[in-house]
Image (spheres, grey):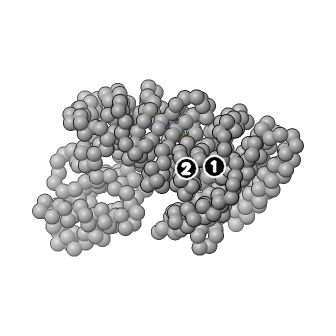
Amino acid sequence: MKVLKFGGTSVGSAESLKNVKSIVESINGPVVVIVSALGGLTDRLIATAKTAAANDLTYLEEVEAMTERHLNIIDNVIDECNRRDVKDTVLSLLSDLKRMYDGVYLIRHLPQMTLDIIVSYGERMSSVIVAAMIKGGSRHDSLKFVKTEKWYDKNIADQKLTTHLIKEEFSKPFDKAIVPGFISTDCKTGDITNLGRGGSDFTAALVAAALDAEILEIWTDVDGFLSADPRIVSDAILVPHMTFIESMELCSFGAKVIYPPTIYPVFHKNIPIRILNTFNPSAKGTLITDSSCEGDLNVKGISAIRDTTLFHLGGNISGKLKNTVSRTFNALAKKGVKVFNVNRNDEKSGMSFAVAKADADVTYDLLCREFAPELSKGSLSLPERIDNVATIAVVGENMKYNSRLGARIRHTLSRDGISVEGHSEGASDTTMAYVVDSSKVDDALRHIHTLVF
Ligand code: ADP
Ligand code: ASP
Ligand code: MG
């Protein structure tokens, strides 16, 4: 059995929904289809909530526009005999949504819990439309079977419980099962939560892994995984094949094609992923499997995390470097801070690493706390930080066979006047990282792309 996931642009208009219908209906036998909200809707739901919280009545016009968009799509994709029922269901959801906004407007306050309820309406509505549009379609409500638990101040998937509930939900025969992506409920309180922006991919992976699917197909608006973000590198090329590890690295370094946590559940079950284009369904796309294939490119892609901060810990630690590294990584891991290991280019002794800008203040505090004894003795200097840098990743499991690539990349960047604040080549077999000033990241990506592809 296959699991298919259609992203926002794929379900964003009547025309694209007709493509979805023909793709799904062309599959013989049962299939699970995960859908996102209509393209751009989640952003609008959030923006409208902020408008209402700012006591601005224009939120009402936004609700009106959302209503019109959904009704218009229903008129264009749903058979006349079902149209009234689908409209009634969607209008009832929209009326609940409006009451949520009215409440936010009145109290001028937008708690996270309320925002989580508001954003859930996107997928709740799109899944009603898609289920009614597809022959043999039935809607299966992920609010019942995708569960999250609290992890510090985040909601993360409770994978064990979710797997159990998915198996239960799909234990009876079904034909085309339509599931809203992204949304979930808390395993203890039942409150509505979600899997994070872009999280429909993750819903699809959880379902694919729980049901031992033969393949997870991610249908989107590009021909597959490209060698770089096509919005920045216009001559990015299609990568026909990559491994789970390579796709995981590229996505955790900012490639938006797949939401990063998606890959783990299917990786563990060795379920291949194929990235396909809803607007060009006959294109072969990108296949992601557990190991490299003959003829694979050495470098599979480049991507960047734009907002990062570079840290350096220095002082009298040369003899204790290993210990300093493990204390730093442990202290940060406990708070869920992801670290990119890099070396400073000015060859300062000590250790350097980059973190997401959003984690920079927490990181600084954690370092000061962890190394308080050394800081007070003066054997370690206060952490140095460089803000507004981007971390670029060059990814490919076979790169290790090209030992001069790192030096060539650094040479290219310096020739083009882009200074590299830090780099890591060989820390992992799969990824080389370069830290550059944020304002130079697009140029750097283009220069590296021209060199490598
Ligand atoms: P969906 O709504 O289908 O989930 P997303 O917008 O989340 O789609 O992801 C697809 C988009 O990711 C593409 O339209 C493209 O602009 C962007 N993207 C960024 N990096 C890459 C890459 N390396 N290969 C392909 N697409 C990429
Ligand atoms: N609709 C959600 C978002 O825009 C989830 C998704 O599309 O995957 O983030
Ligand atoms: Mg996406």
Q: Is mark 1 within 8 Å of ligand 2?
A: no
Q: Nearer the viewer, residue 314 or 26?
A: 26
Image coords of residue 397 (percent x, y): 32, 41
Amino acid beneath label 1: Val
**Number of the front mark, 1 or 2:** 2
Image coords of residue 113 (percent x, y): 62, 65
Image coords of residue 388 (percent x, y): 37, 47
Q: Is residue 305 left or right of residue 187?
A: left
Spatial CA span between label 1 and label 2: 9 Å
The residue that disc 2 covers is 213
The residue that disc 1 covers is 32
The answer to the question of whether label 1 and label 2 lie on touching residues, with beta carbons closer than 8 A, is: yes
Question: In the structure shown, which secondary structural element does the residue marked by tag 1 occupy?
Answer: strand
| Within-10-Å neighbours for mark 2: few <14, some 14–19, many 20+ | many
From this view, report whether residue 36 is shown above or below residue 225: below
Amino acid beneath label 2: Ala
Question: In the structure shown, which secondary structural element does the residue marked by tag 2 occupy?
Answer: loop
Q: Which mark is residue 280?
A: none
Q: Is residue 13 left or right of residue 273?
A: right
State whether residue 10 appears in this view. Answer: yes
For the point 52% across and 69% down, the residue is 150
Image coords of residue 119 (percent x, y): 65, 55
Q: Nearer the viewer, residue 288 or 188?
A: 288
From this view, report whether residue 249 is shown above or below residue 278: below
